[in-house]
Amino acid sequence: MVEDTDMKEHIVCPFCGCLCDDIIIGLEGNQIKENKNGCAISKAKFLNHHDDRLEMNAPLDELVEKAAKIIANSKRLLVYGLSSTENDAHREAYKIAEVAGGVVDNTSSVCHGPTILGAQESGEAHAALAETRHRADLVIYWGSNPQFAHPRHLSRYTRAPGFYIKDGKKDRQIWVVDVRKTISATVANRFVRVAPGSDLEVLCALRAIARGKVLDVDEIGGISVKELTEIVEAMKNAKYGVLFFGLGLTQSKGRHRNIDAAIRLIQDMNVYTKWGMMPMRGHYNVAGANKTSTWQTGYPYAVDYARGYPRYQPGEYTAVDMLVRGEPDAVLNIAADPAAHFPKEAVKHLSKIPVINIDPKRNMTSLLAAVNIPTAIAGIECDGAATRMDGLPLYLKKVVDPPEGMLPDRDVLRMIYEEVRRMKK
Ligand code: SF4
C-alpha cells in the first residue's frame, strides 16, 4: 500500500457487466494511486483514467448550442450508445429523441439484442449471480470467454465457494461450449467443441434427447450423439445449473433463434431440476440501457419517435440498419464508439452527416464528429446508477473530481435538451 493513501472501499468497477462492488481505491489528493481487488482491466482503467481525454475545444455553452442546432434542424435524428454511462444520462437522451422526433437505440442492438428477442418469444428462466455462487453445481459458458472479457466472473461467482457449495473447484463443474478452445476452456472441467454455425442444431438436439427422442445420426454440429446424451443426463442430474451465454451464441448463425432454443432447453430442464440462464453483458451498463429504455419508452432498444409516440422495430430502427440505409441526417452518440465497431457501410454514412459525440475519451467516433463534448467518467469522476448483468442495480460512486469544466453526461444532455426545446418552440 502507498503511504499516506486515503482508501475508499466498496467502489463499483464500471468496466464490464460484472460491476464488481468490492473495489478499494487508494487516493493521494485527487490522484488514484491504487486499485485493490480489481482485475487487470479495472486497474488499467482506474489508474489511467486521465489518459486519452477528449479536450474541450470551445466553451461548453457554445458546444451545447452547436449540438442543439444540429438536432433541432435534423429530420431523422439517431441517438445511439448509452451502455457506458449511467441511468440518469439515459433518461435525458430519451427526452432528446422524443423532442426531436428521432430514433433512440443502444449498443445491445449489436450484442445481446437477439437475447431480448429470444426472451420476448419464449420467456426467460433468469438466474442471479449470488444464487449461482451459492447454489450452482453445474455452470455452462456457451459462446462466451469470461477469462478474457469478464476476468473476475469465475473467481467471484463460479469458482468461489458459496453457502451450499463448500469448495468452488470440487463441488462445481464448469463447462465451456465454443467453436474453439478459448482461455476459459483451458480452465474449465469440460470443453465441448461445437462446429461453427451449428449452435441451433446442437441446442435442438439436446432438447430432443431430453424429451426422449432417438436421433438416427452419429453426430450433430461436430458433437457425437453419445456426448450430447451425456450432456443432457448431466444437466438433468445437476442440483442447480446455470447457462451463461455470450456473443458466440447471439451473433452467430441463428441469432435470436439460438437464444429461443437455449431458453426452451432451460425450460425443459426445469421439468427435472432447477436451471437458470444469463447473458454475459459486456459494457457495464448495457443491461441498464435496456431497462431504462423499457421504463421510459416501453421498449428495450430500437425505438422511433417519428410519430410522436414510441414504436419498436429491431432491424428497422436499429442503428446499423438505419446507417446502412443512409437514413439518419444527424447522430447524437453517447458513450459508445460506432466508428470503431460498425460495418464499413454504416461508418461511411456516419462520416457524411453531422455527428455529436459525448464521451470522456478520444475514440474513432471523435475523429469524425462535428461536435465533441468531453464529460466526466461515471463511476470515477461522478456518481450514478447502473445495472449488473443479472439485473441488480448498483450505485456508482464518485472517487475523484473530473478535469475542470467537465460535467456528467446527464448534465450535458439536459443542457442540450433544454436548448433543443427552446429552438423548437
Ligand atoms: S471483472 Fe469487470 S467489473 Fe470486475 S473488476 Fe474486472 S472489469 Fe471491473
Image: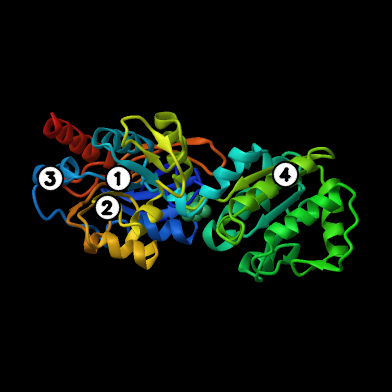
- C-alpha gap between disc 4 and disc 1: 43 Å
Q: Nearer the viewer, residue 172 or 306?
A: 306
Q: Secondary structure at mark 2?
A: loop
- The residue identified by callout 1 is 381
Name the residue type under label 4: Arg
125 lies above or below 356: above
* Disc nearer the start of the sequence (3/1): 3
**Do the numbered discs 3 and 1 sit on residues whose CB atoms are within 8 Å?**
no
Name the residue type under label 2: Pro
* Disc nearer the start of the sequence (4/3): 3
Name the residue type under label 1: Glu
**Do the numbered discs 2 and 1 sit on residues whose CB atoms are within 8 Å?**
yes
- C-alpha gap between disc 2 and disc 1: 10 Å
Q: Position of residue 46 (x, y in %)?
A: 37, 54
Q: Secondary structure at mark 1?
A: loop
Residue 264 marker: 4
- The residue identified by callout 2 is 360
Q: Secondary structure at mark 4?
A: helix
* Disc nearer the start of the sequence (2/1): 2
